[in-house]
Image (cartoon, helix red, strand yellow):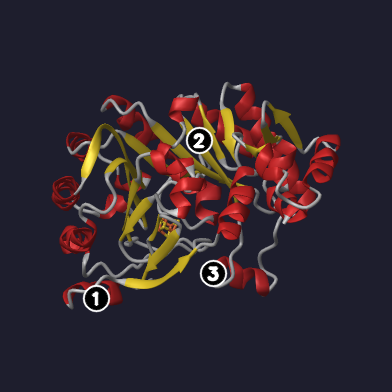
Amino acid sequence: MDRYASRHKAKDEHPGLYVHIPFCKTKCPYCDFYSVVDHSHRATWAEFVQQEAAFYIDEFGVFDTLYLGGGTPSVLDLDVFQELISGLRAAFSFTNDVEITVELNPDDVSADGLRGMRNAGTNRISLGAQSFHDEVLSFLGRRHSMRQNLQALELMQETGFDNVSIDLMYGFHGQREATWLADLEQALTFRPAHMSCYLLSIESGTPFGRRHLEGRLQRLDEEAERTFYLLTSEYLRSHGYEHYEVSSFARSRVQRSRHNQKYWHHVPYLGLGPAAHSFRAGTRWWNVRSVMSYVQSLREGKKPLAESEELSEEQIRLEALYTGLRMSDGLALSLVQTFPRGDAILGDLIRDGLVRVTGDRMVPTPEGYVVADGLARMFA
Ligand code: SF4
């Protein structure tokens, strides 16, 4: 057993598989995920992913999650989607109860498409609804309408998808609390298994980032962000959802995103596609952030790697601190005590209502989530 494996029980868990579909019909002005609007390689995407998969056969064991993210996986034609899944199933082993998640944009959803995805094994959908108000969708530069969001959710119910996650965004300058609460209320009429609620983050290099620099787009001030955040947490918890990660809510523990938890727990994962990240045995590596370079590498018979890094024990420990303070599972007190003044800082945070101790773990409160990264910096 290697040094990393001997120190990390997460090695006992099944690895996860991520596939990046880097195509979008248009770019949303706030988004800094890697995607392109040139779809020249879309029709043959399954073949490229399969070529990359061939480098990793027998290297990761049995996967219990497959997550198709993007970009926009739902822009793939159904035959390409099915070819992609069957190619991955041929290349790798999966558990019988594998969680297969696909991110969908509401304007791509059709009954035939959903049935086809279901027949291919998809059992979880993450819907990028973002809002149930047309003026907010228009501000966010989304292509779909509120009506399309509702239709997509109705179709999912009709086609038997009961494990659905709804993505919503909030925290815009000028947004009223009542508008946001109406979004949450509308989402809950569909009883989603999972909700991901993201505070709008204005990233440099995006159109929103440029508008912000030019003074044409304001951020919410910290106090307003905090108010919106706590309102969200309180509303969803009062409607039976577990706030299990900074932006993630589940109707029950089993309805948490099995796949995303692997990233937060240092469980091994393999990422295929441009800009995808992978992690195993203390090493992280990531692919080139370019469809052209990705395709070129594969055509030359090479892995499309950009870089890799071997994490030291210290880095693993710090990452566990940062992720632990972002999750309701928290982190072991024994880890907290490895930091200088760990016990004293823990006492201060308990006094300020930012964490609590449950059994042998330090667990953040919703107030603690608001400043999770700041809390981690106090220890580090
Ligand atoms: S559809 Fe998703 S990935 Fe594509 S630009 Fe919009 S937010 Fe980004």
Q: Give 104 or 143, whichever is nearer the viewer.
A: 104
Give the x, y percent position of residue 108. Answer: 30, 47
Q: What label does residue 226 carry, if any? A: none
| Label 3 SS | helix
Furthest residue toward front = 1
Q: Give whichever of discs 3 and 1 has the lower sequence position.
A: 3
| Label 2 SS | strand
Q: What label does residue 297 carry, if any? A: 1
Q: Give whichever of discs 1 and 2 has the lower sequence position.
A: 2
| Res 192 seen here | no
| Residue drawn 44% across the image and 48% down it | 5
| Residue drawn 17% across the image and 61% down it | 43
Q: Is residue 211 above or below residue 47?
A: below
Q: Within 10 Å of the Cα at label 2, are there few (<14), some (14-19), or many (20+) other Cα atoms?
A: many
Give the x, y percent position of residue 137. Answer: 50, 50
Q: Is residue 85 above or below residue 160?
A: below
Report, in whole angstroms, how far the alpha carbon at label 3 lies from the one at label 2.
26 Å
Q: Within 10 Å of the Cα at label 3, are there few (<14), some (14-19), or many (20+) other Cα atoms?
A: some
Q: Which residue is mark 2?
A: 195
Q: Which residue is mark 3?
A: 207
Task: Describe residue 72's horizontal placement relative to residue 379 as left or right.
Answer: left
| Residue drawn 30% across the image and 31% down it | 155
| Label 1 SS | helix
Give the x, y percent position of residue 2. Answer: 42, 53
The image quadrant where one finds ligand 1 is bottom left
Task: Describe residue 80's horizontal placement relative to residue 335 as left or right.
Answer: left
The three-letter amino acid code for the residue at tag 2 is: Met
Q: Is residue 332 above or below residue 235?
A: below
